[in-house]
Amino acid sequence: MIIAGLGAAGGYAIYLTNQVKKTASDSHQELDRGKKSDKRIEVVNPATDHTSVLFVGIDDSEKRSETAQDRDSLSDALVLATFNEDDKSVKMLSIPRDSYTYIPEVGYEDKITHAHAFGGIDATVETVERMLDIPVDYYVRLNFNSFVEVVNSIGGISYDVPFDMTEQNSSDQAGAIELEEGPQTLNGEEALALARTRKYDSDLARGERQMALIQEIFRETISAKSLNNFDAILESINNNLKTNLTFEEMITFKDYILQKNELTFDKMQLEGEGGYIDEVWYYQLEEESLSETTDELKAHLGLSNPYVKEEEPDTMTKNEDDSM
């Protein structure tokens, strides 16, 4: 969306530069399943079809990498966006990182954030598809280094900070970020700290905050002033982004930006309640909220007929699996 936004603001010719093409090419990584979701009859085309994109923010800081050993990093932020081609509308669903759900990669229920640690982006996509019963056509995986660099390259973002806070920075230095409540301009480290913090409000509020920050970053990126930092924005993306979108597919999203009214996002949340299972904290989703969300996303994707789920093996919890 950043690449599409820059193109929309600067004219289609900007897409044809070698630098943009190289960024898209270097970032491209297919899923093991191939181009088509198992929940699709045919491969979708974002230029003509309703599509979905899973945005995955990962924490691969040096400290986390040391503790993860041979595993992939955890997914610290999950946002599923659906794009309706007919009215050029976008819905964004924040998925709480501690959501308790079945992870096909390991065959038991656990926090959804662990799916990426167990099997990378393929396991994350598969888990989200199973939980929501909708196809995930594309993914965009971005690490926190790029988040910080993108915000800095656009000169920071304006945001009304909801509370006084003290938080660690991207290098896990405790107390490095201090913010006061109220409207202000945030640099990359400050925006990341606000997106990551979990101790000042609820999981739902955290998800709402992350989506609001994404929207503000997008708005600033396509502003005229950001075109002067075009090279810096692309450089910040180049080394920290992976996606199965091709260059040609990326630029089709410009149509969502070039519509008459300013692009807005219909932000959605999964309701639930936090609690302990075997002394481990999980976010347990409300079945009614999950079902209503699934129906709304299916309708937005034009999937009028509910999918018939394949019979799944009996699920088990992590602790049950470990005891076998």
Image (spheres, helix red, strand yellow):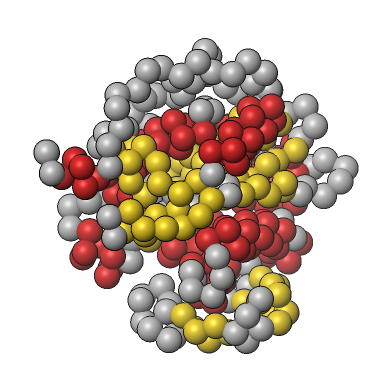
User: Is 81 displayed left or right of 266 in the figure?
Assistant: left
Q: Where's residue 284, x and y in %?
A: 46, 49
Quadrant where the image shows the C terminus:
top left
Where residue 165 sits in the image (x, y, percent)? 55, 83
For the point 75% across and 44% down, the residue is 257
Above or below 95: residue 188: below
- Seen from the viewer's position, the closer of residues 261 and 14 is 261
Corner quadrant of residue 168: bottom left
Q: Nearer the viewer, residue 174 or 276?
A: 276
The residue most toward the right is 260
Tell me residue 88's x, y (percent): 76, 35
Q: Observer-nearest residue: 110 or 266?
A: 110
Note whether 154 is above or below 74 in the view shown: below
Residue lying at 24% horizontally and 45% vertically, measured from the top left: 318
Residue shown at the point (28%, 65%) measured from the top left? 64
Direction top: furthest residue: 41
Q: How many marks?
A: 0
Whether residue 304 is visible: yes
Q: Residue 127 versus residue 51: which sits nearer the camera?
A: 127
Rendered location of residue 81, percent (x, y): 60, 41
Position of residue 199 relative to residue 58, above or below, is below
Q: Determine whether, in the image, residue 229 is placed left or right of residue 99.
A: right
Q: Kindly identify the residue that appears in the image at 68 percent across and 49 percent down.
A: 267
Residue 8 seen in the figure: no
Q: Residue furthest left?
A: 324
